[in-house]
Image (cartoon, rainbow, N blue to C red):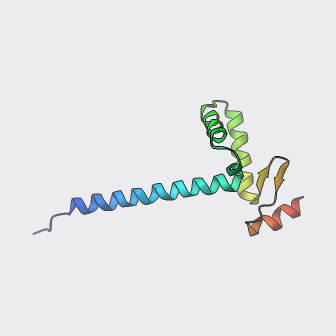
């Protein structure tokens, strides 16, 4: 005879996994905010910018933002008000951005 499944244990395991995934997502979003330099912006301005981004329907603008984000991840540099500067926390950034500058 087969042993019955423990549905409560399976549900708890799934809930724990979902909680872990959510915590990881929040941590990664926080790291992204810091990596882009957006942590220097006050919360209201950052929230307003994110609301404007999500409301934007202009596909060309979204594509431009995507390319800028891909470039940031590829080069390991972080944007500043004056343009792009080295990300001193990333060892990859110190070599690649100086070679292209």
Residue 86 screen position, x and y as percent: 81, 60
Residue 66 at x, y = what percent? 69, 44
* Residue at image point 77% right, 58% down: 77
Image-based side of 54 in relation to 24, left or right: right
Q: Residue furthest right?
A: 101
The residue located at (67%, 38%) in the rendering is 45
Label tally: 0
Question: Residue at point 67% right, 33% down?
Answer: 59
The answer to whether 41 is drawn above or below residue 21 in the figure is above
* Image quarter in which the N terminus is found: bottom left
Quadrant including the C terminus = bottom right
> Measured from the top left, where is residue 91 in percent x and y?
75, 69
Residue 72 falls in image quadrant: bottom right
Query: Nearest the camera: 17 or 40?
Result: 40
Residue 44 drawn at (x, y percent): 63, 39
Q: Height in image: 39 above or below 53?
A: below
């Amino acid at each position: 005879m087969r042993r019955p499944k423990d549905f409560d244990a399976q549900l708890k395991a799934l809930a724990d996994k979902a909680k872990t995934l959510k915590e990881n997502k929040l941590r990664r979003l926080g790291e992204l905010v810091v990596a882009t330099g957006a942590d220097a912006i006050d919360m209201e301005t950052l929230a307003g910018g994110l609301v404007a981004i999500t409301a934007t329907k202009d596909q060309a603008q979204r594509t431009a933002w995507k390319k800028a984000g891909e470039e940031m991840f590829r080069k390991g540099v972080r944007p500043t008000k004056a343009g792009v500067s080295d990300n001193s926390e990333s060892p990859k950034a110190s070599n690649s951005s100086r070679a292209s500058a």
